[in-house]
Image: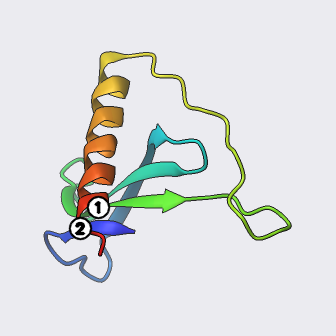
Amino acid sequence: AGGIHFYRPIKIGNIVEIDARLIHTSERSMHISIRVRSGSPSTPRELELTTQCLTVFIEKGPDGKAQPIRQMPLLTDEDRRLDAHARELIELRGSMAV
């Protein structure tokens, strides 16, 4: 997981909503955007963003190496925008590697 942003705490007793969305696939990885919102049970339509991050998953084969995965089709403009954003983050991470 990377780029974790904490915006506000989740209070005991709050409703919590977690939204996970596949935004990019590479040859051997899946990049998933995760957003967490919470709020009072008395006002469930007024949930506020508490946390967001990007998580990357790979599937390991029996040899312990990452296996090829099926590619996500980019069907909408939003799909293409999110995929481009994930690619920018991948490039940024690569430029920071030592």
Classify mark 2: helix, strand or loop.
helix
- Residue under pointer 1: 93
Which amino acid type is marked by label 1?
A: Arg
| Local crowd size for mark 2, using a 10 Å CA cut-off: few (<14), some (14–19), many (≥20) | few
Please tell me in which quadrant of the rendered image residue 52 appears. Answer: bottom left
Out of 14 and 81, give the one closest to the viewer: 81
Q: Using the image, determine if residue 75 lies above or below residue 9.
A: above
Mark linked to residue 96: 2
Dividing the picture into quadrants, the one containing residue 21 is top left
Q: Where is residue 7 in the image (x, y as percent from the top left)?
A: 13, 69
Where, quadrant-wise, is the N terminus in this rendering?
bottom left
Image height of 33 relative to 51, above or below: above
Give, as a three-letter code, the residue at label 2. Met
Q: Position of residue 38 (x, y in %)?
A: 27, 63
Q: Residues within 10 Å of mark 1 (few under 14, many from 20)?
A: few
Residue 36 visible at all = no
Residue drawn where x is 44% and y is 51% of the image: 32
- Work out which quarter of the rendered image holds the C terminus and state it: bottom left
Would residue 6 appear left or right of 89 to someone viewing this image? Answer: left
In this rendered view, identify the residue nearer to me: 33 or 63: 63
Q: Are marks 1 and 2 in contact (CB under 8 Å)?
A: yes
Rendered residue at 22%/55% (across/down): 47
Residue furthest to the left: 7
